[in-house]
Amino acid sequence: MKKKILSAACVAAMGLVLAMPAAANKGNDISDVSEWGDSIQEYAEPVAEEDAAIEESLEPVAAGEEIVLPQTEIDMAKAFYLDAGYGEKEAEEAALQYVKEINVLYQEAIANGYDVTDQEIRDYLEELKQQYETAENKEEIQAFMDQFDSEEAYWDFQFEIYKKDLPIQKYNEAREREYVEEQNTDGNPDEILEIQNEWADEFEEEKAEAVENYEFTVE
Amino acid sequence: MKTKLKKAVLYLLCLSFVLSFAGGMNAEAATKRKEATKSFFFTTPRGQTAAVNVFATITETYTKGTTKNKFTKRDCFLAYSAAYSGSKPKVTRTAGVHRSIKTGEVKKNFKKWTKGTYLWDVAKYPYGSGSYNSTSVSYKKSTDRKSGFSYSVYCADSLIPTQTGSVYVSLKTK
């Protein structure tokens, strides 16, 4: 019976995922990715040249201190949501929430010991370069990358972005592993896909809750 | 002595009969297998990418016949790794089916699936899952059918949030 329910839930979830438009999707295609890549250019250079507020936001905050939300990050995210088809106000709200979540995740990652060295970022980007070559949606990545002055400019930008993102990725990976181990109590490996998808929902909830525990300042 | 010899001859005759009968049936079990590794990237609101690497396999077990093959088991397995910061990508897969290679039309759905046990490179793909079905179906050796399944990778907060992939193996043996 449990198997039947799980199978039915799986089929329903699959149908839902295929039918459901994403929060950010209004039937976008590769031309929208190009457009957004173009929109981001005015921020790409300052980011690659170590934007002061972004640099400050990389510093760990002490208890009771405000988390710095870099205006550049908010503007970039707003450009993303606008290109995704959001209205001005919705794009602004979504961008602010997104940047809050990313910066809270970063602070929690650092507080839990998931910091990274420049060499680790460089190694990760080298892996990405290779993976892009064989990606199924290579054209999409290329459309975004093509908006940069050069491939080098794209990777310089990514280097700065991943100073924040790589610790978050490591932190997320550890939390996900912990969640799966806790939930997969009967050791059945085949329930893992379902559990991981449950984690995706749990992750969204925890992220939103964590934001409530901090104060922010936009710089 | 004569009796012993008779018995031995009889035994050898029986054995050769059984062996030749088995040969005539050509009841040799074999498998057809396909594995596919695919990477998907999602550009997200600060210009970074969420990465998903999917490893999928389909294995069909069959018994060779003279003109037809009897497919007795199909085993679908999928594992993936995901690197993400803001949004966790979701991977979901459909149940295995048999399709026409020419038209892509589903020719056979299978209802009863049993969760399986698998060995894979967990360092590369931390989590995976699979299941198998043991319904028997027979097709001509020159069949147009293929066996496999499709999957989707979904990442919220991406301009193109859904990507799809699949793994199929041809059931043709001639």
Image (cartoon, coloured by chain):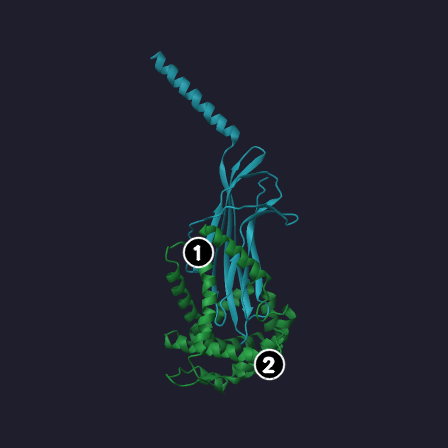
Chain colours: A green, B cyan
Asked whether A16 or A61 is in front, the reply is A16
Residue A126 x %, y %: 49, 69
Amino acid type, residue under disc 1 in the picture = Glu
**Distance (Cα) linking label 1 and label 2:** 41 Å
N-term-proximal mark, 1 vs 2: 2
Q: Mark 2 — residue?
A: A89
Q: Mark 1 — residue?
A: A191
Q: Secondary structure at mark 1?
A: helix
Displayed quadrant of residue A46: bottom right
Q: How many marks?
A: 2
What is the crowding at mark 1: few (fewer than 14 residues within 10 Å), some, or many (at least 20)? some
Q: Secondary structure at mark 2?
A: helix
Residue A115 x %, y %: 40, 75
Residue B13 visible in this rendered orientation of the protein: yes
Q: Residue at x 50, y 29 (%)?
A: B23
Amino acid type, residue under disc 2 in the picture = Lys
Residue A123 visible in this rendered orientation of the protein: no
Could you tell me which chain the residue with mark 1 belongs to? A
Residue A71 x %, y %: 53, 85
Q: For the view shown, which residue lies furthest in the top direction?
A: B2
Q: Residue at x 41, y 60 (%)?
A: B123
Could you tell me which chain the residue with mark 2 belongs to? A
Q: In this rendering, do the residues under marks 1 and 2 share a single chain?
A: yes
**Nearest-to-viewer mark from 1 and 2:** 2
Question: Is A10 on the left or on the right of A86, as rendered?
Answer: left
* Rendered position, A117 above or below B110: below
Residue A160 x %, y %: 49, 78
Question: Is A99 on the left or on the right of A147, as rendered?
Answer: left
